Amino acid sequence: LTQFSIIDSTLREGEQFYGANFSSEDRLEIAQSLNNFGVEYIEVTSPCVSPQSRQDCQQIARLGLHSKILTHIRCNLEDAKIAVDTGVDGINLFFGTSSLLRQFGHGKSIPQILEIATEVITFIHEQSPATELRFSTEDSFRSELSDLLRVYLTIDSLGIIKRFGIADTVGIATPNQVFNLVQILRQSTDKDIEFHAHNDTGCAIANSYSALEAGATHIDTTVLGIGERNGITPLAGLIARLYTLDPETLSRKYHLHELLNLHQLVANRVGIPIPANHYIIGEASFCHKAGIHTQAILNNSKTYEAIDPDDFGLTRSFLLNHKLTGKHAIAYRAQQLGLNLDSSQIQSITQKIKTLADQQQLTPAHVDEILQSSFIQLTVNS
Ligand code: HCA
Ligand code: CU
């Protein structure tokens, strides 16, 4: 799995997150930061939603970033006319194909969808033949397979579309369902396949990985997984999933050291903290606590780390100020502090910390104090 591209949609799907309201400056900085990390594509909000969005879309397209810039529009002529003038590298079109969206959303039948899509795709291609076009069926997993295939195949026969999208719009698909649908589409077209996974049931990363296994070529992500409702595939989660399988490819494709900066920027601009247990860049991700773990990690970090923090410019840490602590971690800390204590001394200090931790909330500073004062006492006594 080396031939895949990430389409990061923090500046489109991410703007649909309940707390997000990016200024022009935010959008430009986030685009730069995504580019520094090295995602292949950046998807930005439709230029049709507001005058500022249109300006920002044009400005991001003009930055000359290494990442290709896409915008995401409804499949209609009015939107298409505005989007072709923005200078983006590609346009992502979508049309709801499930009976729910056809009945209660846009109200169009499958033949009408095909007629409109044909008109829009042909128009964009005539106006701007170099524009990379993608067409996706919104709510793919609640659509009839026969409808999906009819739509994809009819549109494929126009010979214009570069990539087809499958969208798990309400986040209900299972990894097997994703595998099966992508595989069917893989066997029906030679075009690229993009997968967009909502995370309502916590399967977004697994589903995205399943899509890749079945032959998808492009995966949609956002930083911190932000998006409508509880969001979509988190970028760092997809990176973690793929990195453990092939660290060399991931290190070659992306500037992994930029991952934390990117997340800090987005968290700051959305106004949310980075969850401590977020993939890779969360504060707890390389923090080791239980004595059994710290002992083994000190011997060989691979024992309890599937991801090497070094590759991401991050460092591991040990939590000592609790009752689960162990003598190896305490000895390691003593050594760091330059305190020469023998193993029986370390043993008794460890017991002291455990006992104290049963009675009160200890801080790392407490642990250091205990180590230091024990050391002084022991030196004075000897
Ligand atoms: C949305 C649309 C979308 C589109 C995905 C795509 C979805 O709900 O705003 O274009 O492939 O989840 O269906 O984000
Ligand atoms: Cu979506």
Image (tube, rainbow, N blue to C red):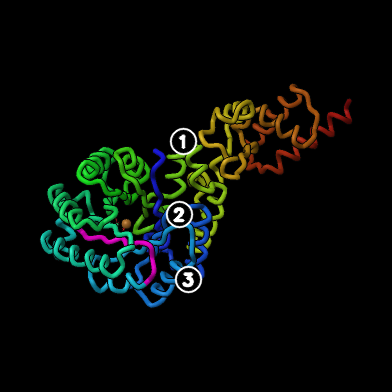
Neighbour tally class for label 2: few under 14, some 14-19, many 20 plus, Cα within 10 Å: many
Residue kind at label 2, given as amino acid type: Val
Q: Is residue 252 left or right of residue 222?
A: right
Ligand 1 image position (quadrant): bottom left
Compute the Cα span from label 3 to label 2.
17 Å
Residue visible at 69% across and 31% down?
330
The tag earlier along the polypeptide, 1 or 2, is 2
Secondary structure beneath dot 3 equals loop
Secondary structure beneath dot 2 equals helix
- Which mark identifies residue 23? 3
Name the residue carrying label 1.
Answer: 246
Disc 1 C-beta below 8 A from ligand 1 = no
Asked where in the image residue 162 lies, by quadrant, the reply is bottom left
Residue 221 place in picture, x, y as percent: 40, 52
Residue visible at 15% across and 61% down?
114
Q: Which residues are magenta?
A: 86-97
Residue visible at 27% across and 39% down?
179
The outermost residue toward the bottom is 51
Query: Which quadrant does the N terminus fall into?
Result: top left
Is 155 situated above or below 53?
Answer: above
Compute the Cα span from label 1 to label 2.
21 Å
Residue 54 place in picture, x, y as percent: 39, 73
Which is nearer the eye, 4 or 268? Answer: 4
Secondary structure beneath dot 1 equals loop
Number of marks drawn:
3
- Which mark identifies residue 223? 2
Residue 192 place in picture, x, y as percent: 30, 49
The tag earlier along the polypeptide, 3 or 2, is 3
Neighbour tally class for label 3: few under 14, some 14-19, many 20 plus, Cα within 10 Å: few
